[in-house]
Amino acid sequence: MNRVLDERMMRRAIASARVMLGHTWPNPTVACVIAKGDEIIAEAVTAPGGRPHAEEQALALAGDKARGATVYVSLEPCGERSSGACSCSQRLVEAGVARVVIACNNPERLSAGRGLARLKAAGVPVETGMLAEEAEPLYRAFRHKLSTGLPLVEASATGEGFDAAVTLEPGETPQAALRRLGRAGYTRAWAPEGSELASKLKKLGFLT
């Protein structure tokens, strides 16, 4: 294993995933790079709306060339799909990849170690935590939504990279607005910097 090469490939995946922030909700943005040595065979990012998953797209692009390749993924591959489709971990096994390198763990119930267990049971070497600190900012909101049911709220001048803006309907409280956004599947919301709404959300402890 070449640590320098591994980090370069993972940074490529992290950078690709970052570009799709705000476009893949309710799923997190994930990038997958398939490579043999320093040759990139295929790469993909979670599609708008959350599907198809990054691994699914990258494996389709790679075809038979995925066999024996190393796969770099910014977030742990799913162990099961809510749609009943083949999971990304199973797709990786069936593609015959030689190794899977992962940045961050995935606490969602359909992942949460299940994908890792499937890969390991099939004899696929797995390395986790590769550049996790660099990738983790991509998943703070996703983790927050899983634990609270509410989107993570930040102040922004433009709203670029966010899922939705926090707005209050007539008579609606900030708490109710966040619950509404959470039910809609949004994970990362924004309020205008310096606005009265941002100040109110900060006082209530909702704005980071």
Image (spheres, rainbow, N blue to C red):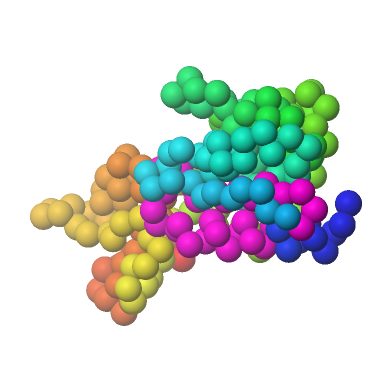
The residue lying at 40 percent from left, 63 percent from top is 161
Considering every residue shown, the one lying at the far bottom of the view is 194
- Res 108 seen here: no
Q: Tell me: 178 left or right of 27.
A: left
Work out whether residue 44 or residue 64 is closer to the camera in this orientation and state it.
64
Q: Residue at x 19, y 57 (%)?
A: 168
The picture places residue 182, in percent across and down from the top left corner, at 35, 44
Q: Residue at x 58, y 63 (%)?
A: 15
> In the current view of this chain or complex, which residue is farthest to the front?
64
Residue 171 picture location, percent across and down: 13, 53
Q: Which residues are magenta?
A: 10-38
Asked if the stretch drawn in magenta spans residue 163, the answer is no
In which quadrant of the rendered view does residue 38 lie? Answer: bottom right
Relative side of 112 to 187, left or right: right
Q: Is residue 120 visible?
A: yes
Viewer-closest of 103 and 56: 56
Q: Is residue 76 above or below residue 151?
A: above
Give the number of marks: 0
Residue 100 relative to residue 51: left or right:
right
> Residue 187 at x, y = what percent?
41, 50
- What is the x, y in percent for residue 154? 41, 66
